[in-house]
Image (tube, grey):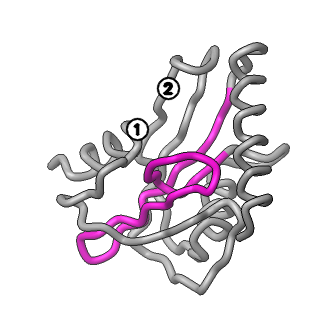
């Protein structure tokens, strides 16, 4: 990806963040834990630093499950089989209310995928995550590992 594209993506993300802070809308998004052989898929975006679970916002007239499947396909090339809800989580730090429904799948196929918004996508051991994992993503992974 060229520098202009990266710069434009970062600018767009900054403007969306500013819009959220000024207008304080309630947002709804999804994240997906893609688990295979004791490892979890994480992505690094081109427009912000850190590692995250694949995911994003819902589109108009889209169900939560369809959004999770779409985001996993767009960001990492995953076609998901069985998908289950892990939980719904809220964050009030940057907006009036940022709500994220997290899903888990251990049944998926990966196809090579290129996305302008994803700088890197990799599997990491569940118990040995890289530096820079976003707090929400780290918390969901830790909750996944809890027995019961």
Residue 138 horizontal side relative to residue 80, left or right: left
The tag on residue 111 is: none
Task: Provide residue 66's location: percent of width, then percent of height.
Answer: 68, 58
Indicate whether 131 appears above or below 100.
Answer: below
Kindly identify which residue carries mark 2: 90
Q: Which residues are magenta?
A: 27-56
- Residue 45 inside the magenta-drawn segment: yes
Q: From the image, give the main secondary structure of the stretch colored magenta.
A: strand
Task: Provide residue 138's location: percent of width, then percent of height.
Answer: 32, 45
- Which corner quadrant holds the N terminus? bottom right
Residue 141 horizontal side relative to residue 30, left or right: left
Q: Identify the residue shown where x is 50% and y is 24%.
A: 91
Precedes in sequence: disc 1 or disc 2:
2
Q: Identify the residue shown where x is 79% and y is 50%.
A: 8
Residue in the foreground of this view, choosing between 35 and 75: 75
What element does badge 1 sit on?
Answer: helix
Measure the C-alpha gap from mark 1 to mark 2.
Answer: 10 Å
């Amino acid at each position: 990806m060229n520098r202009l594209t990266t710069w434009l993506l970062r600018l767009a993300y900054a403007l969306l963040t500013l819009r959220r802070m000024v207008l304080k809308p309630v947002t709804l998004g999804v994240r997906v834990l893609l688990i295979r052989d004791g490892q979890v898929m994480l992505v690094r975006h081109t427009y912000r630093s850190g590692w995250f679970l694949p995911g994003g916002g819902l589109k108009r007239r889209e169900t939560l499950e369809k959004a999770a499947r779409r985001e996993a396909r767009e960001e990492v090339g995953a076609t998901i089989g069985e998908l289950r809800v892990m939980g719904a989580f809220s964050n009030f730090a940057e907006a009036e209310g940022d709500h994220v429904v997290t899903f888990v799948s251990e049944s998926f196929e990966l196809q090579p995928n290129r996305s302008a918004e994803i700088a890197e996508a990799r599997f990491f051991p569940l118990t040995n995550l890289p530096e820079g994992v976003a707090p929400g993503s780290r918390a969901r992974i830790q909750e996944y590992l809890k027995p019961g």
